[in-house]
Image (tube, rainbow, N blue to C red):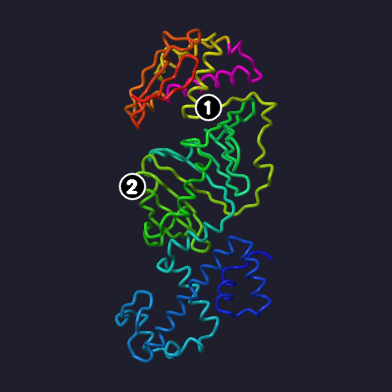
């Protein structure tokens, strides 16, 4: 079955289809997230319509027109004047023609934002199975679209997330974040691969779709009421997601995002915003779109984890490549100086990607050591590092020490053994 028009779902909510057709439509909605969202919206508006008509019947008995949407008198509203002079509005729901019901529901569903709650948007997001969209970070209000680097996100519940990165309109790389396994980044020619092994902090596998998970799970009462708006030249419902610092525009028919902006004050194109747009919901994504290069064939590098284990691995790498010495300083400004000590590891420049991969690898290890040290400084751990006069020839010599939050102290010796002692 092809996806039916919105009015078909309205008719289904009104019970105008025969049993066989109704069953086929419900089966289709069970397997199509777009139509499931349309069916949910139609059912919601049908409930509202019933409430409206019960109020009309009560008005018929009391001769006092009431606005069922706001719970207020409509005496001074033009619609109320029509209600007092037009006999069809005095009749019960059962006397209204189905076509009239459909017109009323369509007006309610797509002509006003007051009937759509953010919880309805969250239902549509929960039913969405896959999405492709554009992602732009650190957007400055003075930049035009042509100046902005961007990524195309492809999110699949089966495979994970693929990010294709572009700079000046040219593809600069691809990052694969699978549901299970390491994060892999490649160059356009696959000359080398970066494998990010850590699953915490900024390398979290959930990060590329954290924005989507946040929208799905945020408490609906932390989101503003919907307002009618226009975005990207199309009608939309706007929600201000203040606790996430964002503004969300959704399509009135599917209730799925058209544009999502996060940033200071959560306004569109505000300085340093992050923008998600150009959404394609529930596309058919071929499996090979998530195929990664064969790591056995590529010149690849390993991103150490940004924790104690990654720090020790990085120091061990440096000592192995320099005959047992350690970086003289872990200050991030000294990375270039320490890199110059690894020329034997880099070897001569080659066109096959080996040289580039090795320089990238060394940079990652040294970057890990300085970032780990900097984090200790920022948390008042008072780290002390003695790499300038300690090497692996004196395995028991103290290489580094710092204070822990629980009052203990961590010591790392030149043989890279780690001991935690009472301070």
Category of crowding for the residue at label 1, using alpha-carbon neighbours closer than 10 angstroms: few (below 14), some (14–19), many (at least 20): many
- Between the C-alphas of marks 1 and 2, the distance is 36 Å
Vertical placement of residue 319 versus 132, above or below: above
Q: Residue at x 66, y 19 (%)?
A: 352
Residue 348 is covered by the magenta coloring: yes
Category of crowding for the residue at label 2, using alpha-carbon neighbours closer than 10 angstroms: few (below 14), some (14–19), many (at least 20): few
Vertical placement of residue 146 versus 250, above or below: above
Q: Which residue is mark 2?
A: 265
Q: Which residues are magenta?
A: 345-372
Residue 408 is covered by the magenta coloring: no
Position of residue 401 measured from the top left corner of the image (x, y, whole percent): 39, 20
Question: Which of the numbered marks, if any, corresponds to residue 68?
Answer: none
Position of residue 199 measured from the top left corner of the image (x, y, whole percent): 52, 37
Vertical placement of residue 98 versus 322, above or below: below
Q: Residue at x 56, y 12 (%)?
A: 321
Position of residue 154 measured from the top left corner of the image (x, y, whole percent): 58, 45
Q: Which residue is mark 1?
A: 304
Q: Quadrant of residue 70?
A: bottom left
In primary-sequence order, the first of circles 1 and 2 is 2
Q: Residue at x 40, y 85 (%)?
A: 56
The C terminus - image quarter: top left
Q: Secondary structure at mark 1?
A: loop
The N terminus - image quarter: bottom right
| Principal secondary structure, stretch drawn in magenta | helix
């Amino acid at each position: 079955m092809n996806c039916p028009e919105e009015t078909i779902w309205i008719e289904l909510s009104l019970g105008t289809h025969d049993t066989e057709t109704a069953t086929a439509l419900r089966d289709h909605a069970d397997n199509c997230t777009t139509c499931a969202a349309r069916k949910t919206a139609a059912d919601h508006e049908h409930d509202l319509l019933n409430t409206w008509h019960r109020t009309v019947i009560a008005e018929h008995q009391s001769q006092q027109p009431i606005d069922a949407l706001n719970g207020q008198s409509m005496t001074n509203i033009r619609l109320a004047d029509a209600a007092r002079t037009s006999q069809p509005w005095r009749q019960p729901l059962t006397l209204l023609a189905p076509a009239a019901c459909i017109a009323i529901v369509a007006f309610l569903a797509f002509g006003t934002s007051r009937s759509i709650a953010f919880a309805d948007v969250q239902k549509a997001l929960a039913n969405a199975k896959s999405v492709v969209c554009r992602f732009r970070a650190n957007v400055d209000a003075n930049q035009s679209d042509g100046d902005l680097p961007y990524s195309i996100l492809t999110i699949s519940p089966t495979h994970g997330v693929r990010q294709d990165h572009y700079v000046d309109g040219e593809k600069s790389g691809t990052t694969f974040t699978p549901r299970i396994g390491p994060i892999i980044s490649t160059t356009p020619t696959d000359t080398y691969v970066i494998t990010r092994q850590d699953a915490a902090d900024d390398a979290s596998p959930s990060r590329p779709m954290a924005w989507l998970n946040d929208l799905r799970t945020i408490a609906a009462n932390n989101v503003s009421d919907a307002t009618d708006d226009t975005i990207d030249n199309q009608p939309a419902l706007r929600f201000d997601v203040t606790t996430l610092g964002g503004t969300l525009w959704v399509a009135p028919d599917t209730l799925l995002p058209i544009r999502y902006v996060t940033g200071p004050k959560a306004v569109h194109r505000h300085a340093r915003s992050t923008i998600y747009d150009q959404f394609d919901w529930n596309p058919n994504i071929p499996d090979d779109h998530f195929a990664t290069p064969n790591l056995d064939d590529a010149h690849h590098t390993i991103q150490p984890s940004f924790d104690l284990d990654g720090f020790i691995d990085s120091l061990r790498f440096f000592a192995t490549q320099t005959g047992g010495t350690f970086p003289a300083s872990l200050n991030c400004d000294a990375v270039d100086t320490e890199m110059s000590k690894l020329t034997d590891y880099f070897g001569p420049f080659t066109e096959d990607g080996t040289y580039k991969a090795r320089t990238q690898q060394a940079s990652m290890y040294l970057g890990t050591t300085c970032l780990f040290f900097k984090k200790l400084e920022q948390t008042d751990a008072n780290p002390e590092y003695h790499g300038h006069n300690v090497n692996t020839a004196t395995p028991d010599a103290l290489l580094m020490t710092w204070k822990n939050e629980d009052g203990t102290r961590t010591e790392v010796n030149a043989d890279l053994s780690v001991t935690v002692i009472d301070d």
